[in-house]
Image (cartoon, rainbow, N blue to C red):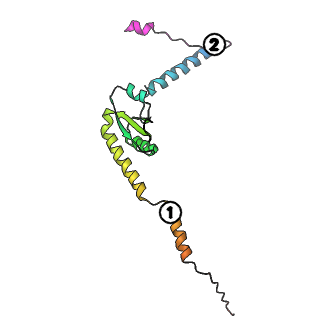
């Protein structure tokens, strides 16, 4: 083990006009700070929306579900909330585009909960009347109850 530690070398390139001890010291301290920061970060672990290739590389098995809804952004928001790793693929073979949601096999329960919340949100949106319809109804009621404005001017005789 000691030989392995001794045999490691580091190449450090420094651009300078005159190599002094101060320049060498600052270069080494910057290199050590860089190594410390790199060790702290660790390997990058992807989560949330990914490409299919990145999802398959994690070697945890992949399952998929088919969605026909065009509003995928709402689903992405809910899936991110539940911490589901997923990949979306658009299937254009039919007359209506379908979306395939690929996810890790271990995320099955979290994805089920995410889909339940997503479906509940979409149903709730369908129940609500649009704001434009509400405004039209209000305009109609105002037009029907059109009362002339009468100004009464009363003056105090003092």
The secondary element bearing badge 1 is classed as helix
Residue 136 in the image: x percent, y percent?
Answer: 53, 66
Which residue position is annotated with label 2?
20
Which residue position is annotated with label 1?
133
Q: Which residue is drawn at the image coordinates 52% and 61% (left, top)?
A: 132
Lower position in the chain sequence, tag 1 or tag 2: 2
Nearer to us in this view, 136 or 87: 136
The quarter of the displayed image where residue 155 is located: bottom right
Residue 47 magenta-highlighted: no
Q: Which of marks 1 and 2 is in front?
A: 1
Residue at the front extreme, as displayed? 95
Nearer to us in this view, 45 or 144: 144
Q: Is residue 141 left or right of residue 158?
A: left
Residue at the bottom extreme, as displayed? 157
Which secondary structure is most common in the magenta stretch?
Answer: loop
Q: Is residue 30 left or right of residue 62?
A: right
Task: Give the magenta part as a residue range.
Answer: 1-18
Q: Which residue is drawn at the image coordinates 51% and 20% (left, top)?
A: 32
Q: Distance between the residues labelled 1 and 2?
A: 77 Å
In the rendered view, would you say 9 is above or below 90?
above
């Amino acid at each position: 083990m000691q030989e392995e530690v001794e045999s490691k070398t580091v190449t450090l390139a420094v651009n300078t006009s005159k190599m002094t001890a101060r320049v060498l010291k600052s270069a080494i301290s910057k290199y050590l700070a860089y190594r410390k920061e790199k060790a702290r970060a660790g390997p990058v672990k992807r989560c949330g929306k990914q490409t299919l290739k990145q999802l398959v590389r994690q070697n945890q098995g992949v399952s998929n579900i088919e969605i026909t809804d065009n509003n995928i952004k709402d689903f992405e928001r809910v899936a991110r909330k539940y911490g589901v790793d997923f990949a979306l693929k658009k299937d254009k073979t039919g007359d209506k585009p379908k979306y395939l949601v690929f996810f890790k096999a271990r995320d099955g329960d979290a994805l089920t909960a995410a889909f339940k919340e997503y479906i509940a949100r979409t149903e709730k949106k369908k129940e609500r009347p649009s704001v434009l319809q509400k405004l039209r109804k209000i305009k109609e009621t105002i037009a029907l109850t059109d009362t002339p404005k009468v100004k009464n001017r009363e003056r105090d005789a003092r």
